[in-house]
Structures are given as C-alpha cells and as structure tokens.
C-alpha cells in the first residue's frame, strides 16, 4: 500500500529525496528523534522549550515548510515542559506562583500573536525580536559581571535559593507579553527571553528561573497548539519521533543540570541569544 | 504594590508541586505509549509511506483516521496539547483550597486564556 503526500509542495529534500522504503522512513524517524533529543537536552538545561533549536533544524536540515516546522515545534515544546516538570527534583522546581502571574501576560501575548500572524511584516518582527534579545543578553552579561566582582570567584551564585523576592514586575510583565507575542508568531516557547528577564531583571535565582520558564513554555505553546492542530499543520509522522526524542532529552537535561554552575548556564544562554539575534537581524534585512 | 502582584509563597507549595509532577508524568507516559504504539502499528502494517504522511485529523474527525496507528498517534499528541490546561486547572483547585486569592486570580485568568485559544482554534 502506497500513501501519497497530502500537499504536493511538501517534500523532504535534505537527508534523502522522497523516502519510499522502510529503511528511508526509519532513517527519517531516527534523524527526527536525534534532533528532538538535542533540543530536549538543551531546552531543559537552559530553561527553554526547545523550539528555538527545533524550528531552525526542521527548516534548514529537513527543509520543512515553516508552518509544519512550527506545528512540530509546538508539540515538542509542550513535551519538554511536561518532561522537565515530571523529572525535576523536589525543591528545585518551578515557582508556580511566579509562573502563573507572568503567564497572564505571556498567554495573552501568545493569543494576540496568533491573531496577528500574517498582519505584521515579518521583517519588522525579526528586527524587533533581535533588539529585545540583544538588550536582554547585554543586561544578563552585565548582571553576571557585577555579581562576580562583588562576590568573588570562590562564592559562586546559587542556582536555587529559598528566600528571594521578584521585583520590577511592570517591566517583567511587559517583556513576558512580548515573549508570548513572539511565541504565537514564531512557534517558540519564549524561554530564551523569560529566563534572562526573570534572572537579570526580576532577581530570581537562575535555577529557579530556568525551572519556572520550563513550566511556562508548555502553557504558552498550548495557547497556539490547537490553532495549528486544526489547521492541519501538525504531522504525526514528524511530530511523534521528534516528541519522543524531546521527552528523553529533557529528562536527561534535568539530570545533567546539577553538574553545571550558574555562570556557565548564563554564558551559554547569552551566546545562544547573540547567535539568534544575529540570525534575526539577517532575516529582517532580507539575507 | 497591588495585592495581586505581591509575591506570596503559595500555601503548601510542595503538595501542588507533587501533584503537577504526577499529572505531568502520567500524561507524558500515556502520550509516549500511545505515540510508540501508533508508530509501531503503522510500521507493522507494512505500508510504504512517503513522509510526512497525512496531517493530524481535526478533533471532530478524530474517528475518521486511516488506521489505528494514526488514531493512537493523534491521541498521544492531543494528550500533550491538553496537559497544560490540566496543569493550570490543578493550580486553580489548589489555590482555591488554600485561599491564596492572588494566585487563584492569576491561575483563573491563564485558564480562561487557554480555553479561549482552544475555542478560537476549533472554530478555524
């Protein structure tokens, strides 16, 4: 029995051309599983949903149309969030109260972003996205250097702390709304904005910010999930192996987190943000 | 600072955290089993597929899947999609029980936003 593509334009052209036999299909599944595994590990370590890695991987490596990549990514983000919440050790979990208060703005942004999709010029959005990312990366670096000069290298910043008080709520809520807006438009969870905002602006310990962001990104992705699902932009044969990889990767990432220091995670996050910012600038300028 | 913005540690956070972990673990295990089962069923059919295959069927047509394999995979994906709503609903119940009104208000607003997006998505 031979099943045809529903969309003639939807072809997978990178690892192989028009997979027609079981061996090709299995290779595709393994490749998607590997992409999901990597996205899940990085997502769990950095407090992201993984969409920021998955969407480029699915479009660049697998040559998926952007909407199919976004649909697959949304399912992966929800899976990452669920897996991290399920696996995180007691006392090192999300600040659910903080997550829900910020999610009021983020979910509103995601719904707005989903509605605005197609109205806003993508070039403008890319440049705005890059601006927010660079500003947040710069402030995260500033906070990191300030902390090191005050505490000394022998006193590493704790990833988790019991007594902290989030501050600068208006700014935090505003940026959370923007993160949701971007999520609804681009299919990412927005964690790469939420984590530095919570840590650098709202004074939340980095480990708590990471876990809280992981809790939030699943809710944010769910705000646009049903739109993509009913529009036919989620393909089970793509989403399922990716999701299985993401789940396993996220579980591994949670276990690996205890071996990392806050400074390393911050540097990795800042490096990622700079790379993504440059990518968005080039995209906005038409390159 | 408005009361609802004050960061109040939720009453019995450990209990809510444990409940969130349980429901997340149950959901991802169920989703993973359904997805694996569906994938296995499709491969066992012996059919030759040109990826990516058909898209997930709309919710109202869920029973019209080409085979059991597709139905199982779609159900696994739907479970993942519904899980965030369940997690927020769990938080609503916990905060209502504990009388943490600021947190309860936030959770109710988020739940309403998710339900709105779900209704909006189904109407497309």
Image (tube, grey):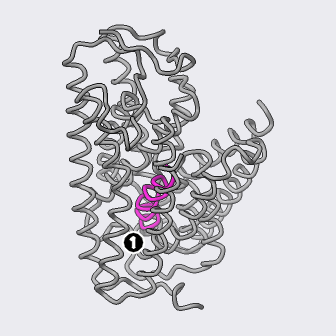
Which percent across, then down, holds residue A97? 42, 76
Q: Secondary structure at mark 1?
A: helix
Q: Residue at x 31, y 18 (%)?
A: A26
B89 or A91: which is nearer to us? B89
The secondary structure that dominates the magenta segment is helix
Which percent across, then down, holds residue A61? 52, 24
Q: Is residue A251 left or right of residue A70?
A: left
How crowded pointer 1 is (Cα within 10 Å; few <14, some 14-19, many 20+) is rated as: many
Residue A10: say if magenta. Answer: no
Q: Residue at x 33, y 24 (%)?
A: A30
Chain letter, disc 1 residue: A
Residue B65: which quarter of the image? top left
**Quadrant the N terminus of chain A occupies:** top left
Q: Label 1: which residue?
A: A96
Which percent across, then down, holds residue A122? 73, 42
Q: Is residue B83 above or below residue A236?
A: below
Q: Which residues are magenta?
A: A207-224
A157 or B77: which is nearer to us? B77
**Quadrant the C terminus of chain A occupies:** top right
A74 or A273: which is nearer to us? A74
Residue A219: say if magenta. Answer: yes
Q: Residue at x 22, y 62 (%)?
A: B22
Q: Is residue A240 above or below residue A165?
A: above
- Whether residue A155 is visible: no
The number of callouts visible is 1
Which percent across, then down, holds residue B34? 22, 39
């Amino acid at each position: 029995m031979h099943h045809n593509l529903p969309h003639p334009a939807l072809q997978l052209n990178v690892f192989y051309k028009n997979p027609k036999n079981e061996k090709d299909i299995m290779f595709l599944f393994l490749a998607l599983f590997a992409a999901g595994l990597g996205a899940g590990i990085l997502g769990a370590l950095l407090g992201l949903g993984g969409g920021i890695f998955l969407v480029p991987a699915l479009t660049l490596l697998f040559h998926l149309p952007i909407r199919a990549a976004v649909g697959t990514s949304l399912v992966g983000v929800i899976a990452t969030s669920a897996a991290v919440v399920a696996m995180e050790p007691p006392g090192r979990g999300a600040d659910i109260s903080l997550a829900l208060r910020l999610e009021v703005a983020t979910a509103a942004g995601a719904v707005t972003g989903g509605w605005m999709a197609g109205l806003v010029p993508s070039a403008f959005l890319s440049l705005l996205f890059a601006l927010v990312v660079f500003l947040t990366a710069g402030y995260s670096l500033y906070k990191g250097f300030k902390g090191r000069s005050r505490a000394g290298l022998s006193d590493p910043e704790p990833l988790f702390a019991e007594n902290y008080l989030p501050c600068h709520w208006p700014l935090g809520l505003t940026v959370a709304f923007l993160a949701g807006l971007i999520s609804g438009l681009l299919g990412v969870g927005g964690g790469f904005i939420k984590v530095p905002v919570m840590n650098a602006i709202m004074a939340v310990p980095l480990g708590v910010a990471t876990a809280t962001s992981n809790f939030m990104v699943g809710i944010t992705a769910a705000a646009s999930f049903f739109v993509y699902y009913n529009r036919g932009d989620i393909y089970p044969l793509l989403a399922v192996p990716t999701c299985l990889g993401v789940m396993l990767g996220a579980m591994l990432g949670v276990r690996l987190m205890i071996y990392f220091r806050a400074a390393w995670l911050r540097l990795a996050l800042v490096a990622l943000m700079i790379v993504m910012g440059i990518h968005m600038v080039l995209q906005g300028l038409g390159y | 600072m408005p009361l609802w913005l004050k960061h109040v540690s939720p009453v019995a956070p450990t209990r809510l955290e444990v409940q969130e972990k349980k429901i997340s673990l149950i959901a991802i295990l169920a989703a993973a089993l359904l997805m694996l089962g569906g994938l296995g069923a499709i491969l066992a059919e012996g059919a030759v597929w040109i990826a990516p295959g058909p898209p997930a069927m709309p919710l109202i047509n869920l029973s019209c899947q080409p085979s059991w394999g597709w139905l199982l995979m779609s159900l696994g994906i739907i479970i993942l999609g519904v899980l965030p709503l369940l997690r927020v609903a769990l938080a609503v119940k916990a905060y209502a029980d504990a009388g943490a009104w600021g947190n309860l208000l936030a959770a109710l607003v988020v739940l309403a936003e998710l339900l709105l997006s779900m209704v909006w998505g189904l109407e497309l």
